[in-house]
Image (cartoon, helix red, strand yellow):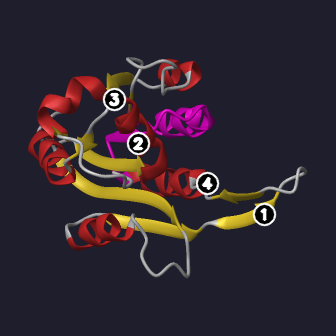
């Protein structure tokens, strides 16, 4: 991780995407250690965590994590999952947070030196390019150490730095617990 002590940093965590990458590496993440790692490397302006939630469920497996993040300095951005019926009559759910992440990155960019994007979604290539045009360095965190790789090649190429999540596990990983989003 290349950061400087006075560098203004923000974390943008695509919850579902990061969960998928961590799961593919058979690990859970310790978000306290993650945020401490970035606080130690610069001025952490904001740590965003984005996730879709299913409304109306008595218990949601993501709720304890969302509550913990909310109480521990993260800005948690949620929106309800949308349910729809596909062409074959199957009920599907959709909870894409890409627009929320892109808007927040662009709005905060003038007050940042470095964006850390925890996602491998190739749809972020264009917003990364736009943030870079404002003079902000961008690090993408995902993994290529799985089959298939969890990061889109176009995002990996666009980012100033790519950090493989697998290489951070000694600092921010923890033994796998249960089946909840990390």
Q: How far apart are marks 3 and 4 (CA)?
A: 22 Å
Badge 1 local density, few (<14 within 10 Å), some, or many (20+)? Answer: few
Q: Name the residue under label 2.
A: 18
10 Å neighbourhood of mark 4: few (<14), some, or many (≥20)?
some
The Cα atoms of the two marked residues, 1 and 4, are separated by 14 Å
Tell which of 181 and 72 is nearer to you.
181
Residue at the disc numbered 1? 84
Label 3 belongs to which residue? 25
Numbered disc 1: secondary structure: strand
Q: Which of marks 3 and 2 is nearer the N terminus?
A: 2
Please indicate whether residue 48 sits to the left or right of residue 124 in the image. Answer: left
Contact flag, marks 2 and 1 (Cβ < 8 Å): no
Residue at the image position 27 percent from the left and 37 percent from the top = 27
Q: Around disc 3, counting alpha carbons within 10 Å, would you say few (fewer than 14), some (14 to 19), or many (20 or more)?
A: some
Mark nearest the camera among 1 and 4 is 1
Of the residues under marks 2 and 1, which one precedes in the sequence? Answer: 2
Marks 2 and 1, how far apart at CA: 24 Å
Which numbered disc, 3 or 1, marks the residue that appears first in the sequence? 3
In depth, the one of 81 and 32 nearer the eye is 81
Q: Quadrant of residue 42?
A: top left
Foreground disc of the pair 3, 4: 3
* As drawn, 107 above or below 118: below
Residue 58, percent from left and from top = 46, 82
Q: What stretch is highlighted in magenta?
A: 111-140
Question: Which is closer to the viewer, label 3 or label 2?
Answer: 3
Q: Report whether residue 1 is seen.
A: no
Q: Mark 4 points at which residue?
A: 96
Q: Residue 117 at what x, y percent from top left? A: 40, 40
| Relative side of 134 to 61, left or right | right
**Residue 12 visible at all:** yes
Residue 95 point in image, percent of width and height = 61, 58
> Within the image, what quadrant is residue 20 found in?
top left
């Amino acid at each position: 991780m290349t950061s400087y002590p006075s560098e203004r940093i923000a974390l943008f965590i695509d919850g579902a995407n990061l969960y998928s990458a961590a799961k593919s590496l058979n690990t859970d993440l310790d978000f306290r250690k993650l945020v401490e790692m970035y606080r130690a490397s610069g001025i952490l302006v904001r740590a965003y965590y984005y996730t879709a939630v299913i409304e109306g469920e008595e218990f949601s497996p993501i709720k304890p994590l969302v509550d913990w993040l909310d109480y521990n300095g993260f800005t948690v951005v949620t929106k309800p999952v949308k349910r729809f019926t596909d062409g074959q009559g199957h009920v599907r759910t959709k909870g894409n947070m890409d627009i929320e992440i892109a808007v927040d990155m662009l709005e905060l960019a003038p007050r940042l030196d470095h964006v850390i994007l925890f996602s491998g979604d190739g749809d972020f290539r264009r917003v990364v390019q736009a943030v870079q045009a404002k003079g902000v360095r961008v690090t993408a965190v995902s993994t290529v150490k799985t089959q298939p790789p969890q990061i889109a090649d176009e995002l990996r190429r666009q980012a100033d730095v790519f950090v493989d999540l697998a290489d951070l596990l000694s600092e921010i990983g923890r033994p796998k617990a249960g089946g909840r989003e990390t």
